[in-house]
Image (cartoon, rainbow, N blue to C red):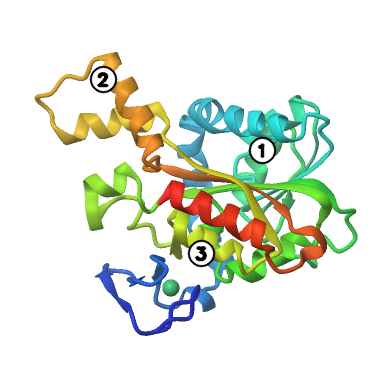
Amino acid sequence: MECPLCRSSEHVTLYYAYSRFDLFECDDCKLLFQRHAETTDVARIIEEVYDDRWVAMRDKYAHLTFQDHALFNTLQLEMFRPGKGRLLEIGSGTGEFLFTAQSAGWDVTGVEASASSCKYAKQKYDLELHNALWSPELAEEWEPFDAVVFWHVLEHMARPVEFLCGVAGKLQDNGLLLFSVPNLQSFTNAIYGKQSPLLTEKDHLYHYSARSLMKLLAQTPFQPVSLFTRQVPNHLEQLLGSSTAETAYSMADKMAILTQLQGKAMGHEICCIARKRPDSAPPTSEAATETERLSQKSS
Ligand SMILES: [Zn+2]
């Protein structure tokens, strides 16, 4: 078995055989991946998973998605591009983030493969999402964007290097890339181990750590500007509730745990902000040093 990221085959071992798929682990780059990740038909999986039933479930938690993710992600955009501009979101889901960004003044475009999600986003937020699986061909006629974002999407992409290179082609030279993925080294995974709800999702083809994410970016035209992990308070409360029932955690305890988790790069998601390298050249030694620094900080 060859690692789809670093192409090493020497240190790849079976991580766990789940009932519906196998996960393999590469000891060289620390990537976890499904056996046939690179040839998976992503469109078919999205159709199966993100149906009306999923959207109904999502509707129940839409206010949390808005509070926990949409607002934070919009704030990140504001920090790195206060002048705003044209924004593309790949995998808009039910539209909470795109609606928030639009309200903040961005000129938004959203692409979403699930027809059920597109219908919801139209009804609830009057958003006209493009109902398609992202491909550079879809955006062939579109002007390059000032920012491209995707939240918890990259782990579903069968060929992530190809995906990121395609995205780079639709981004202005000084444009921003922002994305997040579930964190393989999260507190959630530390508590639940191989049965973690993050690892048992069939549509998560890859599980990234900060280290493997850096390796991935190094194979694309992108250079990370910032990489950090984040733990949403809500998720932590659920985790603490399910770990040691006899312990009551005070607010001060929770605050301390939250900040420590983030400091140790064990938050539930990894957030990454990146820009294209000038002329999409190979990494300079300065960029390589910065990549190394961010990677060390987060691993
Ligand atoms: Zn590897």
**Relative to 146, does residue 19 appear above or below in the rendering?**
below
Task: Confirm whether residue 221 shows in the render.
Answer: yes
Foreground disc of the pair 1, 2: 2
At label 2, counting other C-alpha atoms closer than 10 Å, the crowd grade (few under 14, some 14-19, many 20 or more) is: few
Where residue 272 appears, as percent x and y from the top left, is 58, 47
Q: Secondary structure at mark 1?
A: helix
Where residue 105 appears, as percent x and y from the top left, is 80, 27
The answer to whether 181 appears left or right of 104 in the picture is left
Residue that badge 1 annotates: 121
Q: Residue at x 55, y 72 (%)?
A: 41
Q: Secondary structure at mark 2?
A: helix
Residue that badge 2 annotates: 253
Nearest the viewer among 216 and 55 is: 216
Give the spatial CA distance, label 3 vs label 2: 40 Å
At label 1, counting other C-alpha atoms closer than 10 Å, the crowd grade (few under 14, some 14-19, many 20 or more) is: many
> For the residue marked with disc 1, what is the amino acid?
Ala
Nearest the viewer among 188 and 223 is: 223
Q: Residue at x 30, y 22 (%)?
A: 254
